[in-house]
Structure formats: structure tokens, C-alpha cells
Image (cartoon, helix red, strand yellow):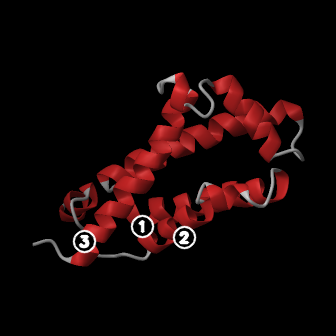
Amino acid sequence: MIKTNKALKLFLRLGIGAAFLSACADRFGMWPEAVSAWGNMDSFINYTQQLVPWAPDAWVPAMGWIATLAEVLLGIFLIVGFKTELSAKLSGVLLLIFAASMFFFLNPKSPFDYSVFAASGAAFALGLMKEKYLEVDIGLQKS
């Protein structure tokens, strides 16, 4: 039987990683319209503008693409267990930035409805879990 901490770590890795990849898939039109939040990158860039009203308009597309690239990389890294602690901490920071932006620039209710603060906390907790389990980091340590 898998130890509870190992199962919890795997659950957190897969859950956070899959959430990142699902959000990015939505931006690339990979989810059906009925369940899609954005449906395309242009809609996501418009949403990004709402989250960073302080940024010059010329910066917003780059910010949206940087966030998307970060989510894709962190999602993959978490799922496969590459540099797990660092990837988890960076995920926590990214999610905390999203949550704070939603709180201050959309409305205070949104980050709670979408559990972004909770996801950030989960990512930070994952970053504290040192024991390796089903991670490519295990193979990298042996090299």
C-alpha cells in the first residue's frame, strides 16, 4: 500500500499540473465551447488585460503568453516530477499572483470561487514535500 504522504504528493502534482494544462488547452481552443472559459488566445489576452490594468497595452499580449508558457512548463514539470520542489514553489507564486490580481482588479470573490488561493497554498505545501515518489527527479539523482 502506498504511504499517505506519497499518495498525497502524487495527487497534488497531478491535480495542479493537470489544472495548468487544462487552462492552457482552453486558450488554444482544445475544449468544447460549452465548457470553455476563453476558447482562444485572444479572449485570454483580453482577460489578462483585466488582471493587469496597470500594464501598458503593448505589454499585455506578452504577459498573457508568458503566463501561458509558465503554466505549460510548470504543468508538465509537476506531472512528471521534474525539479518538483522548485516547480511547486514557482507554481505557488504564479497562482498567488493570479489570485491577488483577481482579488484586486476583478472582484474579491473571484479567486475564492475558483479556489486560486487554495491552489496556491496546495502548491506551496507540495513544495515542502521532500520524499520522492514516481518522479523523474529520482532518476536524475542517480545520474
The answer to whether any part of residue 83 appears in the image is no
Q: Quadrant of the N terminus?
A: bottom left
At a point 56% along the width and 31% down the height, the residue shown is 36
The amino acid type of the residue labelled 2 equals Gly
| Rendered view: 32 above or below 110 | above
Are the two marked residues, 2 and 1, in contact with CB atoms closer than 8 angstroms? no
Q: Kindly identify which residue carries mark 1.
A: 85
| Rendered view: 15 above or below 53 | below
Residue 76, located in which quarter of the rendered image?
top left
| Mark linked to residue 6 | 3
At a point 15% along the width and 71% down the height, the residue shown is 2
Q: Secondary structure at mark 1?
A: helix
| Rendered view: 29 above or below 68 | above
| Rendered view: 129 above or below 73 | below
Q: Kindly identify which residue carries mark 2.
A: 121
The amino acid type of the residue labelled 1 equals Glu
The amino acid type of the residue labelled 3 equals Lys
At a point 61% along the width and 23% down the height, the residue shown is 40
